[in-house]
Image: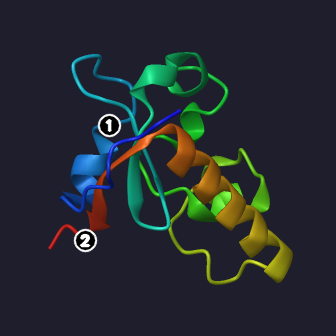
Amino acid sequence: MSTQPPQTTPITVSELAKHDGSDPSLPIYVAIKGDVFDVSKNTSSYGPGAGYSVFTGKDSSKALGKSSLKPEDCIADYSDLTEKELETLEQWHAFFSKRYNIVGKVVPDN
């Protein structure tokens, strides 16, 4: 699968939150390590109620590193991950990078 060159468009945390699949007129985004991926083409996995919808509309780096589907783990701060979990996070980032376009970078709201 080929993807387009990564974009660096700033996407605020609050803007990212709108892209959780609840509004069908907006694309579905998952952020990993600050990179925002457009996963809209895979609604069977990331659409509302789907198995991985917990990751949408936010930076879920910690949860991906921990291989966790717990909403409380779906946060951007992954500083407490173990070395093995950091490897897992890198593998997820690589997986997404090969399959989905990076449409921007997460930035703070202010």
Q: Position of residue 53 (x, y in %)?
A: 55, 32
**Local secondary structure at mark 1:** loop
Q: Which residue is mark 1?
A: 19
Looking at the picture, does residue 74 appear above or below residue 21? Answer: below
Other-residue count near label 2 (Cα within 10 Å), few / some / many at <14 / 14–19 / ≥20: few
Looking at the picture, does residue 75 appear above or below residue 52? Answer: below
Q: Which quadrant of the structure image shows residue 11?
A: bottom left
**Local secondary structure at mark 2:** loop
Q: Which residue is mark 2?
A: 108
Q: Position of residue 92 (x, y in %)?
A: 66, 54
Q: Which quadrant of the structure image shows residue 25?
A: top left
Q: Nearer the viewer, residue 72 or 1?
A: 1
Other-residue count near label 1 (Cα within 10 Å), few / some / many at <14 / 14–19 / ≥20: many
Point out the tag, 1 or 2, that comes first from the N-terminus.
1
Is residue 18 toward the left or the right of residue 97 in the image? Answer: left
The answer, for residue 57, to whether it is visible in the render is: no
Colour mode of the rendering: rainbow
Q: Which quadrant of the structure image shows residue 110?
A: bottom left
Q: Residue at x 46, y 57 (%)?
A: 59
**Which residue type carries mark 2?**
Pro
Is residue 55 toward the left or the right of residue 15 in the image? Answer: right
In space, the residues marked 1 and 2 are separated at their CA atoms by: 16 Å
Q: Position of residue 42 (x, y in %)?
A: 51, 22
Is residue 49 toward the left or the right of residue 67 in the image? Answer: left
Q: Nearer the viewer, residue 24 or 42?
A: 42
Q: Is the residue under label 2 in contact with that under label 1 (CB below 8 Å)?
A: no
